[in-house]
Amino acid sequence: MALDTRTQMKYWIIAAAVFIGALWFLGNVILPFVIGMAIAYFLDPLADRLEAMGLSRVLATTIISLLGVLVFVIATLAIVPILIDQASALINVAPSLFANLKNFLSERFPSVLDENSVIGQTLLKLGERIQEYGGALLSTVLSSALSVINVLMLFVIVPVVAFYMLLDWDRMIAAIDRLLPRDHAPAIRQLASEVDRTLASFVRGMGTVCLILGSYYALALAAVGLDYGLVIGAIAGLLTFIPYVGALIGGTLAIGLALFQFWGGSEVVDGETVVHATNWLRIALVVGIFVAGQMIEGNFLTPKLVGSSVGLHPVWLLFALSSFGSLFGFVGMLVAVPVAAAIGVIVRFFLGYYKEGRLYRGLSSPPGGPDQ
């Protein structure tokens, strides 16, 4: 005999509460497993393609894992230290950047920015705060990554979890499917398929877009000769998943630093005043890099890799990241996008039922919908 709707709802509420409680209490303990599962999910289509080419699942997983380890080692040895050094240097130079900005504005708008003006003092204080809190934030991130998460466990467990998850992914999905309640299995499969499509479009697609744009911005800005170009490119690429935010923040930082670095000025060298001309070409190149990046993203990368029917609004993403990060820490930020995608799909599913039901259509509408 099937359970009534009210009893089933109780069981689902209990299951959801247990899941949220597990995230709350386990916290960073499950971080390596969450990362490993995310890596396996991201790479599963590649493993499926290798299988379709005639390789076994074990061989496909082994090849992907070896390539992943190679990429990780190269990134760790060649890229990560440079990014950390540039981020630290950018934070330390922030007060002088804002002081120069104040002087630049004072020379051209003396009536607005004098020595004791509110705007001038604000710029100086803002630079000092960035140095103070930015340095503290960077050291906290690094120290927490070393203390809260055992580095050895992170570097050992994540690849192992990712390997076995990727190896057994199809079998795990089949096992979960066999455990679905028979009455609701078709609806759950439909929802799971829509969630997977949304995640595949957004997480895999936007992850690839962020990687491509971040690499493009970093290499292009470094080639132009902009100081801290690598870290600014990485920031712009990382924030690309929120439409326009990555380009806005990265572009503002890059153009501001370009004006500071390439704007003409004078200095005294060996008792003589040396005048430097403004390098308009390099400033224009920095602007052009971000304009070209936005054109490439909007006209090629996002339509091809993400698609137009993802259904995740940027405001909803920001809310999910903020709320889950506040509640569950770094682990919450990792699961925020998948959970937000799942909630969005479920809400749209039930809205469809609602619009077909009597509560929405009323008694005057023709009969139909899920209540019939």
Image: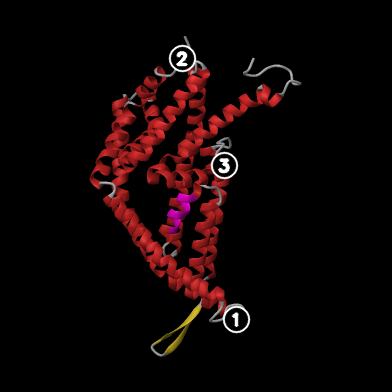
Examine the image and state in which quarter residue 132 appears: bottom left
The three-letter code of the residue at mark 2 reads: Arg
Q: CA distance from mark 1 to mark 3?
A: 43 Å
Magenta highlight range: 232-239
Residue 340 - label: none
Q: Earlier in the sequence, mark 1 or mark 3?
A: 1
Q: Position of residue 53 (x, y in %)?
A: 38, 25
Of discs 2 and 3, which sits in the foreground? 2
Mark 3 falls on what kind of element? loop
Q: Is residue 36 above or below residue 130?
A: above
Task: Using the numbered discs, state the Cα–Cα distance from disc 2 to disc 3 in whole angstroms.
Answer: 33 Å
User: Which quarter of the rendered picture does the C terminus lie within?
Assistant: top right
Where does the image place residue 64, in percent across and percent down from the top left?
A: 32, 35
Q: Amino acid at mark 3?
A: His
Counting the numbered discs, the total is 3
Residue 238 image point, x, y percent: 45, 50
